[in-house]
Amino acid sequence: MKLSILRKAILRWIGNPADILQAASDVTRTRTTRLSAIYLHNAALARLTHACGSSAEELNFDQKSRRTERQPQGDASC
């Protein structure tokens, strides 16, 4: 169930408080996992750019180029 639906339900005394706590916990866990993945991704890019002796911009790792220009897989030349 969506968190907003559960909140509305509890306000009407229909929902189970445990469901609301579980949903809130799930949202927090998902956000934490996402932030961890972003951090690990950025750390890996930093290690790669350091190993190649280039900047992320020179290797086309900035946000805009990833969305608009699709590189063939395996094309990570330094």
Image (cartoon, grey):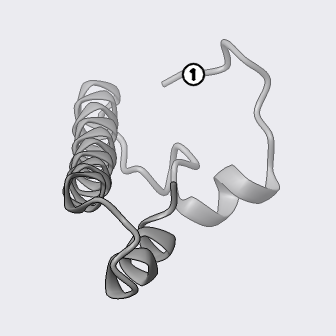
Is residue 17 found left or right of 41 in the rendered image? left
User: Where, by quadrant of the figure, is residue 42 drawn?
Assistant: top left
| Secondary structure category for the residue under label 1 | loop
The residue carrying mark 1 is 76
**Looking at numbered disc 1 in the image, what kind of residue is underneath it?**
Ala
47 to 18, vertically: above or below:
above
10 Å crowding of disc 1: few (<14), some (14-19), many (20+): few
Q: Residue at x 31, y 39 (%)?
A: 37
User: Where, by quadrant of the figure, is residue 16 drawn?
Assistant: bottom left
4 to 66, vertically: above or below:
below
Tell which of 58 and 19 is nearer to you.
19
User: Where, by quadrant of the figure, is residue 51 drawn?
Assistant: top left
Tell which of 58 and 68 is nearer to you.
68
**Percent x, y for residue 60?**
58, 49
**Percent x, y for residue 5?**
51, 72
Q: Residue furthest front?
A: 13
22 to 72, vertically: above or below:
below
**Percent x, y for residue 41?**
34, 38
**Percent x, y for residue 66?**
66, 51
Q: Residue at x 80, y 40 (%)?
A: 70
Is residue 78 found left or right of 16 in the rendered image? right
Q: Residue at x 79, y 23 (%)?
A: 72
Tell which of 37 and 51 is nearer to you.
37
